[in-house]
Image: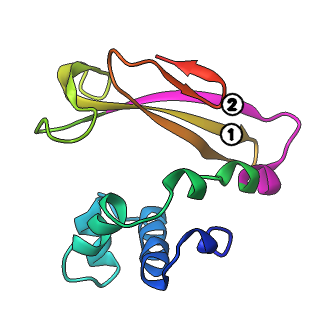
Amino acid sequence: MSRIAGRFARVEPRLRAQRLVLGLLSDLPRKNCWTIAEWAGEATPHGMQHLLCRAAWDAEAVHDVREYVVEHLHDEAAVLVVDETGDVKKGTRTVGVQRQYTGTAGRIENSQVAVYLVYAVERGHAAVDRELYVRGRVIMRDGMWLE
């Protein structure tokens, strides 16, 4: 966390971000603001939701894990894996949710689809980039076009 600590102007969101990351790395069977907040000892998910939705910090600036991953997993035989993952959603209010095919359900459902780029080596793997897929919108990230 010391690598990204300076990206937060205040100590409160920095500490909450640390608890959020530890919660995401934990063995919780379901990971969302409720379960992570409870795991972190918080009474409600409001603080986690505030961090993700309203707090002032630059998510793209914090997302500089590529250098960290290469530093720790560098291998000349590394490969990049592109993974498209769909998450079925009950409602339609979450960003990117629409009726679309998702392999998770094996049919067309309300779902959110994201594309992940994973750096993989014999010793392990790590996600180094991600992008939410929104139908009808072409997205460019790091010089690559994603549809």
- Whether 71 is among the magenta residues is yes
Residue 146 percent location from the top left of the image: 52, 20
> Farthest right residue?
76
Against 136, residue 92 (above or below) is below
Between the residue at mark 1 and the residue at mark 2, the CA separation in whole angstroms equals 5 Å
Circle 2 — which element?
strand
Label 1 crowd bin: few (<14), some (14–19), many (20+), radius 10 Å: many
Circle 1 — which element?
strand
Residues shaded magenta: 69-86
- Residue that appears at 68% across and 39% down: 119
- Residue that appears at 13% across and 35% down: 92
Sequence-first tag of 1 and 2? 2
Report the amino acid beneath label 1. Answer: Tyr
- Residue that appears at 42% across and 83% down: 12
Residue of label 1: 119
Label 2 crowd bin: few (<14), some (14–19), many (20+), radius 10 Å: some
Residue of label 2: 80
Contact between marks 1 and 2 (CB within 8 A): the answer is yes
- Residue that appears at 57% across and 18% down: 145
Against 24, residue 67 (above or below) is above
Query: Where on the picture, by quarter, is residue 41?
Result: bottom left
Q: In this view of the protein, which residue sits in the foreground, 31 or 8?
A: 8
Residue 109 percent location from the top left of the image: 17, 24
Report the amino acid beneath label 2. Answer: Leu
Left or right? Give the position of 13 relative to 118: left
Left or right? Give the position of 78 relative to 21: right
